[in-house]
Image (cartoon, rainbow, N blue to C red):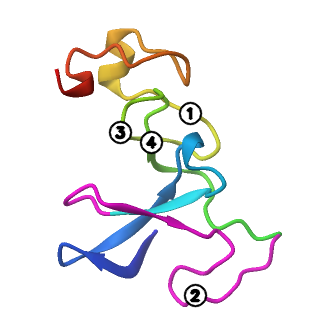
Amino acid sequence: MTIDLECCGTPMSLIPARPQDAPFEYLMYCYECGHYEPWDVDEDPTTGDSQPAEEPAVRGSGYQWCGCRDCFDTVVGTVGTLTLCDDCAEAGCEIQNGECQREDAYGN
């Protein structure tokens, strides 16, 4: 879902947050520079108005953080489940378990 907030001259996108970003469930993300900010799920991202609690903001699939604990790549996956990016899957990383195994992890 694209909204009116901008970064780098382009609209930021609403994506599911990583587990370590709790209590926030969603982030506003800039695909140009990687900047992100927490977003309160109870607010409508286009108006700032509150939404009814029974009406989820995002359903189905979409962009989300890689399921590897220390990776900051985004993947397309099902909302509410964790998915590894291709590089983490090839490196043998595990979802939310241990350090990232990619050769380029941690600035190496």
Which residue is under mark 3?
Answer: 72
Residue type for callout 1: Leu
Report x, y in % for residue 89: 39, 17
Mark toward the start of the polypeptide (4 vs 3): 4
Report x, y in % for residue 27: 48, 61
Mark toward the start of the polypeptide (1 vs 3): 3
**Chief secondary structure of the magenta portion:** loop
Look at 19% across and 60% down and name the residue there: 32
Which residue is under mark 4?
Answer: 65
Residue 82 numbered tag: 1
Asked which quadrant contains residue 57, the reply is bottom right
Q: Is residue 63 above or below residue 8?
A: above
Label 4 neighbour load within 10 Å: few <14, some 14-19, many 20+ = many
Q: Is residue 24 left or right of residue 51?
A: left
Residue type for callout 3: Phe
Asked which quadrant contains residue 31, the reply is bottom left
Is 31 in the magenta?
A: yes
Mark toward the start of the polypeptide (2 vs 1): 2
Q: Are marks 4 and 3 in contact (CB under 8 Å)?
A: yes
Q: Are marks 4 and 1 in contact (CB under 8 Å)?
A: no
Residue 48 numbered tag: 2
Disc 2 to disc 3, how far (Cα)? Answer: 27 Å
Q: Is residue 53 above or below residue 73?
A: below
